[in-house]
Image: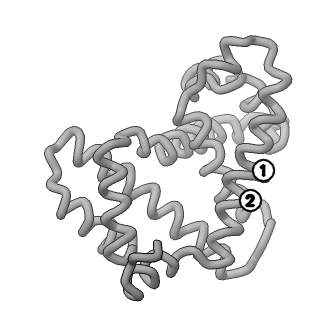
């Protein structure tokens, strides 16, 4: 923003580096939301196309950030750090959403959590905490990712398991909540 101080601009831009942008591209474009949209076209049910679970949609895109690195997409330590930094941010969002909306966490405590646990500078920490005040469902990124990892872990022990068919089956269910997808593909 043009009216920000030099310190504020530096704090805001510090985490918007090329590695972070690559991780965001994995989440937002390929294979994240883009691949979801390709599968959405094949879902036969309008209900499954139109009514969606925030945890399924954002959880899958967050899940693929880690999955891509685990699958060997890149060994660049900068990208690995960016992915883990974003995962840590989502973990902090999870804790702050629950803290603010279920446990009367004061806003200064939420800001401190983003700074001390999420390693954000003050301005981004304030912005994240404020978002948590009006968007309690921003915990859905982590919730969805954990549910997907749990489902995948349960299916990995079965004979014939492979990652691509798991993803195809998962995405072929549309945007149902992960527990319903579990019932359909287990």
- Residue at 56% in and 45% down: 145
20 to the left or right of 128: right
**Badge nearest the viewer, 2 or 1:** 1
The image shows residue 107 at horizontal and vertical percentages of 19, 57
Marker disc for residue 56: none
Left or right side of 125 for 171: right
- Lower position in the chain sequence, tag 2 or tag 1: 1
Contact? badges 2 and 1 (CB < 8 Å): yes
Residues 37 and 159: in front is 37
* Residue located at (45% from left, 84% from top): 10
Q: Secondary structure at mark 1?
A: loop
The percent coordinates of residue 94 (x first, y second) are 38, 49
- Left or right for 123, reference 50: left
Q: Nearer the viewer, residue 92 or 168?
A: 92
Q: In this view, which residue lies farthest toward the front? A: 3
Q: Position of residue 44 (x, y in %)?
A: 81, 13
Kind of element beneath mark 2: helix
Q: Residues within 10 Å of mark 1 (few under 14, many from 20)?
A: some
Q: Is residue 166 visible?
A: no
Place residue 120 in its image quadrant.
bottom left
Quickly name the residue at label 1.
Answer: 31
Outermost residue, bottom direction?
6
Disc 2 residue crowd, few under 14, some 14–19, many 20+, Cα 10 Å: some
Taking the spot 55% from the left edge, 68% from the top edge, the residue there is 84
Q: Is residue 91 above or below residue 21?
A: above
Is residue 87 visible in the rendered structure shown here?
A: yes
* Real-space Cα separation, disc 2 to disc 1, in angstroms: 9 Å
* Quadrant in the picture for residue 125: bottom left
Quadrant containing the C terminus is top right
In the displayed structure, 92 sits above or below 32; it is below
The residue beneath circle 2 is 68
């Amino acid at each position: 923003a043009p009216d920000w101080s030099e310190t504020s601009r530096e704090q805001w831009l510090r985490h918007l580096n090329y590695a972070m942008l690559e991780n965001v591209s994995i989440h937002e474009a390929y294979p994240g939301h883009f691949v979801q949209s390709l599968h959405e076209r094949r879902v036969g049910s309008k209900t499954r196309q139109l009514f969606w679970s925030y945890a399924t949609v954002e959880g899958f895109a967050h899940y693929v950030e880690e999955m891509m690195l685990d699958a060997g997409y890149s060994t660049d330590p900068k990208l690995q750090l960016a992915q883990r930094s974003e995962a840590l941010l989502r973990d902090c969002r999870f804790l702050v959403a629950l803290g603010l909306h279920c446990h009367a966490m004061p806003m200064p405590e939420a800001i401190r959590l983003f700074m001390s646990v999420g390693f954000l500078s003050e301005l981004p920490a304030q912005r994240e905490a404020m978002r948590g005040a009006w968007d309690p469902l921003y915990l859905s990124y982590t919730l969805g990712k954990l549910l997907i990892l749990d489902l995948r872990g349960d299916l990995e022990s079965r004979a014939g398991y492979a990652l691509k068919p798991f993803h195809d089956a998962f995405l072929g269910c549309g945007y149902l909540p992960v527990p319903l997808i579990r019932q359909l593909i287990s």
